[in-house]
Image (cartoon, coloured by chain):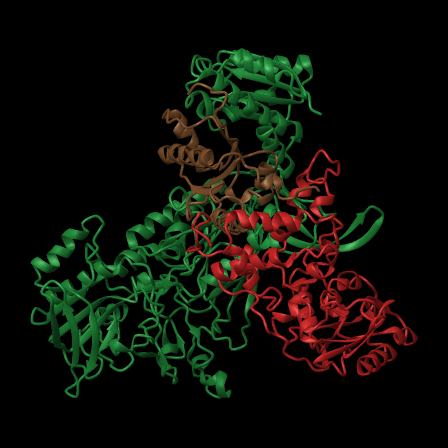
């Protein structure tokens, strides 16, 4: 897709667990299943390694959307990691809604190492959603310094 | 600040066709910390690796970033190359600009921009990398098998045949387990004892196998390769070294009212007993709760009749402490209690029995000497009803949500055996589904229906009611014909759900092996590591992991043995260096991290710390790096950030976030 | 109150405790403050009245390091905080002699002021012994009257109960003060549009002067070193160029105490800017109750904490929430 000066180019951080989702992203790559370059992947050992602070940090530094991908529940390489991640993210996302941050800027998706198609689809959908939401202003603007 | 070298791979045209590699080199060479940047057609080639070696030496690099394919492909290659250059291998990071960039983007400008950002993130991370060293731990070349059923026996035999010492701990007086209680086995109908007892004898005679019966695991400490286990040898009250197994004591014992566990309580046994004729060891135990000598102090008949002088009323429990490198859990199963299933009248009528009880009734050594008869009046039944899925696939809390897996086949077996031996007996089976996935299984079931005329009815039984005439009124439904069925039966057999042996919970806790809501032990990975527990060095054999039949159990027992052998064959274990590491000065001692650790790798210690001049004893977290697998669950529960993950530290991940979002 | 003083003197005299942790009279009638009392004579300053809102449980972290036992007075709600600290091994039960003190609802001077009462000199009706339905207030503008109920702290209107969950003995009567719905304010915000929610919180959080009073008073926020003061996350840059701490402090603080916060309400009580900080914590409590079953931090020290536990059937984070 050619670059267009006026087009909104969101910054999107995708945390992917090493065992399932990162491998799923690799499969999307080797299958040439494209998704926008706006998505940048950070590898973590497990979805349970993702501290809510990382997500808030990303938003504060200018990210417009953050997505966390891990093994499907029941398939975690470490057995239980994604179950903890699920609770943490459920509460965090609910809090962000409560603060008036647009739903949809955060997402969790379970992607296995075999789901290259799902990875690509998920990223396409997510970028689409973030583009429709526009630039993330609120999380950076939660405290007016006046 | 590190001295970083960045190496951008063309991967032929795989990367270079979409990413302007020269541009990437140009841009990243201006990044803080970067003092060398170059591109090369194939970084993974020997010549490419030499580029890294030379640059590390010439420019005295302390960190390396390779912009190439996925780290899943060549991270190990580049780490080794760095190591050859004298660099710590964990000072290398990969920016995945192929799978995550060149292969999915078409526009060169866009892909190049993204490649630069991915490289920046890797550079930012390497800037915070620290050299990591894989630890080493020793391996005790001895295995412990908990449970002496067919699973435990097979695992022990396989490990012992590979040349390693194995101890079996069995809590009952004999090895043999559930299989020793079975009469015949499906789908071949060979006699269970005939195929099991040679294995029992082989295990007992094996020079590498040591069997502790009437014994339980009391305590487990340590970790993979180096477990220390306390085994409680319960007082048998009989000296095993002296006993000849003649059996006179059992014959003469005046206390004969105890329920015979081996026969599922359908008849009684003496207070001094061996559970069954082929028991191994063939040494009786005294049931101290039933023994008159122990209850009143008077009696002593067994002592008087024992020619060998083997009776020892003063024997005490003995604790044996042994070291093991691997532990295999093979604790097996039991049938569920039917107290909540009043509708089947199990507790009201002696003629309503479980399938395992039927096994004992059909067995020549059983309570009826192998004659099929009603336990209430000893009469031969004419009409028998089998009810499947009693407590299995159950949606309420009375039973189990899972399929017990073996019931369809053993019910077909029972039905066939009864029709074969007693052709005048009508057999009706009520089922939800008949599940026969297994070699020769469906053929076996079809034989029951087609050759032996077993009447299969799709539908569930709502009620079994004892009638005044001694018969049982079975009220069921036939879903295919959509009609109610009322049948007077002489005997009703319940295919009762199986559940893990109750003791497994305690054992799992001792081993810090995880267990699911049904008390089945959890696998390290449900598909790819099905015989390993998530706790390193602990392996799973048989039904303790999930319902399975004998061939599956034996197969899994062998697989568990192979995994244990693979561990025991090593002299040293290298441990993953990307483990959690607490900062003792920041640790609150709150234990939240220990609560989420799936490996039991976190313990707490009261330790004297020196916090900027203040010396005090604090409760601080300790991570056993041999157990920690590096998931990082603990790091997020830790509010103060005291717990961090090496190789994926908070600062490293935040640096990547910042690099991507800047 | 005299009964508390007498009992404290007795326990000091017979050597059961080495010191007493309670409240002493402040410079005004309505601002008593937490204090240690080492001797019987010190206890002449002791006070326990309806203005003793301060939760003393957090002080027991330091007291647990001292020689001998400390007598601590805990109100019913404070005992939950103590229990939570016990669960997290932060306090030593053996080092505490706990007298559970009755509570008839604690008063909020700001609420009284908001009712137009200014220039307060003296308040009667707030002692423990005669806590009555009306407060008689002497001001420089003359005598005023305010109903007790209307002057209570927010948390007392939604009190979680007057049972002491941990104590050695209990002295004094409590009375039921509940006249509000605990989650009604959270629900009111939840029902707003995203725009309204955002404006609400932006307005409140913009008042924050980052004085750390909330953090310092919070019994759950008891880390030896706060992440915002350590270098563990690169989150402690105090320079103005980095605004991560500025913007995210309260969200992260709330997340760190999620599942551990007993809703003691101290954060809101001490906030000099009057930010209703408890609304963050209470949102998490409401979510935890709804998603994972009712859970009261500090109630049962053996209970599985919601964030260090899971069920296979837990809801998904993307599920529509509202």
Q: Quadrant of residue B284?
A: bottom left
Is A35 above or below relative to B142?
above
Nearer-the-camera pick, B539 or B509: B509
Image quadrant where residue B376 sits: bottom left
Residue C158 visible within the image? yes
Q: Quadrant of the C terminus of chain B?
A: top right
Query: How many numbered discs, if any?
Result: 0
At horizontal 70% and vertical 35% (from top left) the residue drawn is: C242
Spot the brown chain and give its letter: A
Tell me where residue C45 appears, x and y as whole percent. Answer: 88, 73
Give the chain ID for the red colour.
Answer: C
Left or right position of C137 against C314: right
Outermost residue, right side: C41
Q: State the image coordinates of residue A64 (x, y, percent, origin top left).
A: 53, 35
Q: What residue is drawn where x is 27% and y is 82%?
A: B348
Along the line of sight, the residue nearer the viewer: C115 or C103:
C115
- In this picture, residue C233 sits left or right of residue B331: right
For residue B578, above or below residue B23: below
Which of the two residues, A108 or C159, is positioned nearer the viewer here?
A: C159
Question: Is A105 on the left or on the right of B403, as rendered?
Answer: right
Please provide percent x and percent y for residue C125. 77, 79
Q: Is residue B134 visible?
A: no
Please say if B573 is above or below C189.
Answer: above
Residue C285 relative to residue B275: left or right? right
Residue C36 position, x and y percent, is 85, 67
Residue at left offset 40%, top offset 61%:
B518
Quadrant location, the N terminus of chain B = top right
The chain painted green is B
């Amino acid at each position: 897709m050619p670059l267009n000066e006026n087009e909104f180019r969101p910054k999107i951080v995708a945390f992917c667990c090493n065992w399932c989702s990162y491998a799923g992203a690799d499969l999307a790559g080797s299958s040439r299943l494209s998704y926008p370059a706006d998505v940048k992947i950070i590898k973590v050992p497990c979805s349970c390694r993702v501290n809510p602070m990382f997500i808030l940090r990303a938003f504060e530094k200018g990210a417009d959307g953050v997505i966390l991908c891990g093994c499907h529940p029941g398939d975690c390489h470490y057995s239980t990691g994604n179950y903890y991640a699920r609770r943490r993210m459920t509460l965090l996302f609910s809090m962000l809604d409560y603060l008036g941050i647009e739903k949809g800027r955060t997402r969790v998706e379970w992607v296995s190492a075999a789901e290259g198609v799902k990875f690509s689809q998920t990223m396409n959908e997510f970028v689409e959603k973030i583009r429709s939401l526009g630039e993330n202003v609120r999380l950076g603007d939660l405290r007016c310094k006046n | 600040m590190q001295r970083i070298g960045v190496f951008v791979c063309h991967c032929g045209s795989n990367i270079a066709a979409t990413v302007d590699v020269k541009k990437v080199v140009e841009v990243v060479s201006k990044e803080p910390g970067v003092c060398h940047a170059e591109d090369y057609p194939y970084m993974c080639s020997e010549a490419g690796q030499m580029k890294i070696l030379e640059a590390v030496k010439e420019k005295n690099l302390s960190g390396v970033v390779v912009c190439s394919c996925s780290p899943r492909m060549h991270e190990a290659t580049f780490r080794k190359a760095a190591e050859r250059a004298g660099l710590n291998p964990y000072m290398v990071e990969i920016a995945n600009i192929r799978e995550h960039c060149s292969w999915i983007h078409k526009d060169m400008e866009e892909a190049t921009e993204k490649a630069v950002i991915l490289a920046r993130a890797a550079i930012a991370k390497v800037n915070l990398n620290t050299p990591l060293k894989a630890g080493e731990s020793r391996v005790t070349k001895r295995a412990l098998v908990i449970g002496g059923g067919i699973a435990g026996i097979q695992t022990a035999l396989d490990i012992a045949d590979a040349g390693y010492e194995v101890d079996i701990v069995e809590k009952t007086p004999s090895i043999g387990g559930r299989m020793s209680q079975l009469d015949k086995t499906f789908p071949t109908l060979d006699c269970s004892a005939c195929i099991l007892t040679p294995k029992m004898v082989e295990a007992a005679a094996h020079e590498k196998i040591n069997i502790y019966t009437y014994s339980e695991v009391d305590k487990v400490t340590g970790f993979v390769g180096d477990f220390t286990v306390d085994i409680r040898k319960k007082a048998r009250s009989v000296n095993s070294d002296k006993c000849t197994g003649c059996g006179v004591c059992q014959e003469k014992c005046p206390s004969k009212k105890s329920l015979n566990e081996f026969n599922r309580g359908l008849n009684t046994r003496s207070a001094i007993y061996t559970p069954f004729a082929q028991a191994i060891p063939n040494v009786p135990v005294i049931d101290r709760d039933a023994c008159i000598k122990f209850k009143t102090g008077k009696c002593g008949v067994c002592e008087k009749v024992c020619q060998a002088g083997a009776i020892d009323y003063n024997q005490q429990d003995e604790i044996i402490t042994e070291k093991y490198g691997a532990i295999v859990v093979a604790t097996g199963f039991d049938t569920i209690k039917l107290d909540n299933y009043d509708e089947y009248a199990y507790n009201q009528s002696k003629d309503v029995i479980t399938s395992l009880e039927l096994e004992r009734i059909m067995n020549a050594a059983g309570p009826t000497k192998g004659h099929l008869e009603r336990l209430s009046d000893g009469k031969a039944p004419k009409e028998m009803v089998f009810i499947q899925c009693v407590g299995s696939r159950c949606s309420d809390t009375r039973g189990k949500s899972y399929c017990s897996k073996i019931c369809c086949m053993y019910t077909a077996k029972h039905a066939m055996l009864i029709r074969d031996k007693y052709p005048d007996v009508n057999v009706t089976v009520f089922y939800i589904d008949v599940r026969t996935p297994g070699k020769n299984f469906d053929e076996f079931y079809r034989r029951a229906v087609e050759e032996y005329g077993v009447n299969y009815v799709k539908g569930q039984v709502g009620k079994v009611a004892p009638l005044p005439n001694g018969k049982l009124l079975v009220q069921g439904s036939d879903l295919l014909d959509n009609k109610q069925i009322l049948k007077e039966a002489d005997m009703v057999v319940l295919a009762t759900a199986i559940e893990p042996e109750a003791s497994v919970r305690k054992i799992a806790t001792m081993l810090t092996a995880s267990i699911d809501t049904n008390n089945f032990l959890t696998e390290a990975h449900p598909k790819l590591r099905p015989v390993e527990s998530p706790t390193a060095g602990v392996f799973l054999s048989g039904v303790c992991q999930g319902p399975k039949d004998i061939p599956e159990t034996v197969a899994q027992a062998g697989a568990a043995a192979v995994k244990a052998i693979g561990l025991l064959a090593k002299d040293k274990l290298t441990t993953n260096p990307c483990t959690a590491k607490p900062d003792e000065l920041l640790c609150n001692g709150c234990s939240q991290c220990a609560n989420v650790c799936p490996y039991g790798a976190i313990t707490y210690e009261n330790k004297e710390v020196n916090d900027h001049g203040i010396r005090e004893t604090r409760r601080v977290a300790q991570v056993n790096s041999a157990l920690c697998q590096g998931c990082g669950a603990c790091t997020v529960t830790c509010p103060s950030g005291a717990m961090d993950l090496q190789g994926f530290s908070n600062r490293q991940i935040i640096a990547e976030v910042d690099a991507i979002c800047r | 109150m005299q009964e508390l003083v007498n009992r404290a003197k007795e326990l000091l005299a017979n050597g059961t405790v080495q010191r007493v942790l309670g409240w002493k009279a402040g410079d005004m009638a309505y601002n008593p403050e937490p204090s240690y009392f080492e001797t019987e004579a010190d206890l002449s300053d002791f006070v326990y009245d309806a203005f003793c809102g301060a939760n003393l449980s957090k002080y027991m972290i330091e007291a647990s390091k001292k020689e001998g036992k400390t007598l601590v007075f805990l109100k019913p709600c404070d005992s939950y905080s103590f229990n939570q600290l016990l669960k997290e091994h932060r306090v030593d039960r053996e080092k505490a002699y706990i007298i559970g003190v009755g509570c008839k609802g604690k008063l909020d001077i700001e609420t009284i002021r908001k009712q137009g009462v200014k220039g307060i000199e003296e308040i009667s009706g707030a002692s423990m012994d005669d806590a009555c339905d009306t407060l008689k207030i002497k001001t420089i503008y003359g005598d005023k009257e305010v109903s007790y109920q209307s002057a209570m702290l927010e948390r007392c209107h939604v009190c979680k109960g007057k049972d002491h969950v941990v104590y050695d003995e209990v002295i004094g009567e409590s009375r039921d003060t509940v006249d509000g719905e605990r989650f009604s304010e959270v629900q009111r915000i939840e029902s707003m549009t995203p725009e309204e929610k955002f404006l609400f919180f932006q307005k409140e959080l913009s008042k924050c002067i980052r004085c750390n009073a909330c953090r310092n008073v919070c019994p759950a926020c008891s880390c030896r070193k706060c992440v915002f003061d350590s270098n563990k996350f690169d989150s402690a840059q105090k320079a103005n160029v980095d605004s991560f701490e500025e913007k995210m402090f309260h969200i992260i603080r709330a997340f760190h105490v999620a599942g551990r916060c007993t809703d003691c309400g101290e954060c809101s009580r001490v906030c000099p800017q009057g930010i209703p900080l408890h609304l963050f914590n209470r949102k998490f409590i409401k979510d935890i109750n709804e998603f994972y079953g009712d859970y009261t931090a500090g109630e049962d020290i053996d209970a599985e904490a919601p964030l260090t536990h899971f069920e296979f059937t837990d809801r998904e984070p993307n599920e529509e929430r509202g």
